[in-house]
Amino acid sequence: MRLPLLLPGVALVASMAAVPVSAAAAELALRQAPSARVVLDLSRREISVVSGVSRLGPWPVAIGDPTTPTPEGEFAILNKKVNPVYVTHKGGKRRELVGPSSPIGDRYLAFHRNGRGEFGIHGTPWPHWVKTRAAVSLGCVRMLNAHVRQLFEAVDVGTTVEIRN
């Protein structure tokens, strides 16, 4: 017998009847599962949290531009930040931007560092790029702010991030 996926708002009970549950309860169940992992499918441009037969998501994402692609492979969440600081030097002046209207939104999950810098999963104040699943970033993964908050709460530092094409 194949078990269906657990969706936010629905739980399966012994009789296999659907029983409403909160999205928070679904996130907690995924978070407590030792094998939970983040899966990013670059070809579909969507991201999910998966544990066994349970799944949170999928959510649409914007990914790296072809000249600065999102790295593929297996990584891990290195750190998580609420209200990360985005520093810009536009106009020759240093400015720090924070919060949901900053270019990286109000949640940031770093997953990889290399010679090009640090790569993260973060929010964005430009939902159009996510909704059209564009390839526009410098390699980071952009999500709608509401979606990245759900992902942020569902995973811990050390959670595996699997990025495949």
Image (tube, rainbow, N blue to C red):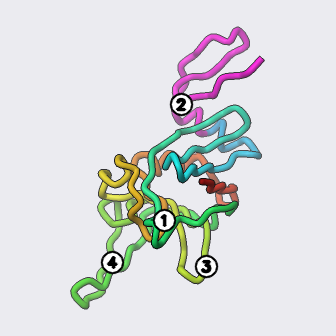
Where's residue 79, x and y in %? 60, 66
Q: Could you tell which of marks 1 and 3 lies nearer the N-terminus? A: 3
130 vs 35, left or right, is left
- What's the distance in space between the residues labelled 1 and 3, CA to CA? 13 Å
**Residue bearing mark 1:** 140
Pointer 3 local density, CA inside 10 Å: few below 14, some 14–19, many at least 20: few
Are the residues tagged 2 and 1 within 8 Å (C-beta)?
no
Q: Assign the C terminus to one quadrant of the image.
A: bottom right
Pointer 4 local density, CA inside 10 Å: few below 14, some 14–19, many at least 20: few
* Residue 63 position (above or below residue 34): below
- What's the distance in space between the residues labelled 1 and 4, CA to CA? 19 Å
Residue at figure coordinates x 62%, y 56% from the top left: 163
**Residue bearing mark 3:** 114
Q: Assign the N terminus to one quadrant of the image.
A: top right
- What's the distance in space between the residues labelled 2 and 3, CA to CA? 35 Å
* Nearer mark to the viewer, of 2 and 3: 3
Residue at figure coordinates x 51%, y 64% from the top left: 81
What secondary structure do most residues of the magenta stretch adopt?
loop
Q: Could you tell which of marks 3 and 4 lies nearer the N-terminus? A: 4
Pointer 2 local density, CA inside 10 Å: few below 14, some 14–19, many at least 20: some
Asked if the stretch drawn in magenta spans residue 47, the answer is no
Range shown magenta:
1-27
Q: Residue 8 carries which label?
A: 2
Where's residue 112, x and y in %? 61, 70
Where's residue 156, x and y in %? 64, 55
* Nearer mark to the viewer, of 3 and 4: 3
Asked if the stretch drawn in magenta spans residue 24, the answer is yes
**Residue bearing mark 4:** 96
